[in-house]
Amino acid sequence: METSLHDKITILAGAAKYDASCASSGSTGYKGKGGDKIGTAVHGGVCHSWTEDGRCVSLLKVLFSNVCKYDCAYCVNRVSADIQRSSFTVKELVDITCEFYKRNYIEGLFLSSGIFADPDIVMEKLTETARTLRTEAGYGGYIHLKIIPGTGEKQIREAGLWADRLSVNIELPTEKSLNCLAPEKSGKTILGAMNDFSCVSCEYEEARSKPKFISSGKTTAPWFAPAGQSTQLIVGASGEDDRQIINLSSSLYNKFYLRRVYYSAFSHPANRGGFELSGFNTGICDKNYTDPRLPEIIGPPLVREHRLYQADWLLRFYHFTAGEILTEDEPFLDAHIDPKTAWALRHLDFYPIEINSADYETLLRIPGIGAKTARRVIETRRSRNVSFDTLRRMGAVLKRARYFSTCSGSIIDRPDDPVRIRRLLSDIDGAGLQLPLFEF
């Protein structure tokens, strides 16, 4: 019996639900030739749909196919899973993307796939979809394609000409865990794909910085995946500590110039619910699935995921090193205070910091003061001193900053008792766990 397009959307959107690495930030849109285009990408990304656990689904996020020859223990699409299988055609995906955009359902496409054949064949289908959208449908919106591990550099080169961003999921923190839970996958192959992208991207950047002159006039190299590459790492499916995860992320940023590492809290395939998409409910789960290799958890470790994102923020924007965030003696992030405050409480001799004389790097070390606020402080100090009231209006969170800063010698509360400060700044109160929403 042939699967209807309605059912394909239901099945393949639900199958893509747990890939978190689909933010569209970082691209200003496809810059190919031509006049009228359908759609445009925006710097800040788009947010239209939300899953039941609070994740934002900003794009039409689907798999080309959920047929897969791999048997990854944590994946609902593994070959041993008893689920309904389906696949799109290139034309179906192109038509759906354009129609959904015209109806204002989506502003971009995130496309991945199960490994239903040789990696080069699967990657060619994803690339063909993006190429058709650009060249035949005139689509100018955001496109994010997954690199299929094992595909060749030639395929990566082609994909980057049509997509805004490419990504290959590293999946798990260590080769040992990958061998245990996803034995058909290889860490070396995954890192090789990241390296291929990095090398090709640098090649295009260098070519664009050196225009060539030919008989027909001046030309430059085409754009290659202008939003860069990202990856996703599953948290909690294996036994690595947070220190190993942060060290890995730091290494990936430094070596492959990744734009983002996404952290996905492990959710057991037996506990996964459905996903709403324009009124459709996928209901994908595997109630009877058990695997001794997987941890038995009540729910996904979302607090741990949240803390890892905060630590990742420190790496990318606050100029912390991985060794400062976590040590061998303290390999896990504190569940009740953010990692920046945790560092401050371990280094009270560094505080208090004078707001009106500290440089930008030092201001970033004050809990409650983020990068934007630090820049505002530097700008404001050119004409006048900054008071605590001014600091609050700039966006600082004085609940935290008050213990670690002074303004023209004035101080609200001295950083003299780390136990007391930790208790006052803990996310746990009478109502339960409260995650911070502002700059830390």
Image (cartoon, rainbow, N blue to C red):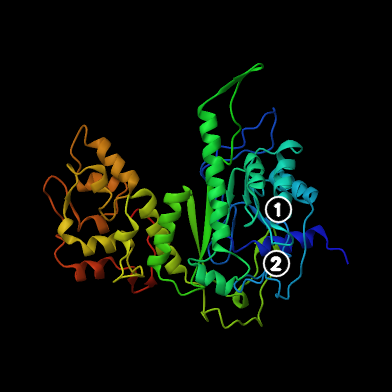
Q: In this figure, which residue is indicated by the disc labeled 1? A: 120
> Residue placed at 40% from the left, 61% from the top?
246
Name of the residue lying farthest toward the right: 1
Whole-percent x and y of residue 238? 49, 73
Residue type at mark 1: give it.
Asp
Query: Quick check: can you spot residue 67?
Result: yes
The numbered disc on residue 164 is: none
Residue 339: percent from the left, percent from the top?
33, 62
Question: In the displayed structure, does residue 267 sit left or right of residue 12?
Answer: left
Which residue lies at the image location 70% right of the left edge and 75% below the top edge?
Answer: 81
Label 2 environment density (alpha carbons within 10 Å; few <14, some 14–19, many ≥20) = many
Specify the quadrant of the image occupied by residue 183. bottom right
Q: Is the C terminus in the top left, top right, bottom left or bottom right quadrant? A: bottom left
In front: mark 1 or mark 2? 1
Say which quarter of the image contains residue 223: top right
- The 10 Å Cα crowd at callout 1, few under 14, some 14 to 19, many 20 or more, is some
Q: Which residue is mark 2?
A: 282
- Residue type, numbered disc 2: Thr
Which percent across, then down, holds residue 323? 31, 60
Q: Taking 413 as reference, is 377 left or right?
A: right
Q: Residue at x 65, y 61 (%)?
A: 16
Left or right of 141, for residue 295: left
Quadrant where the image shows the N terminus: bottom right
Give above or below for 419 relative to 233: below
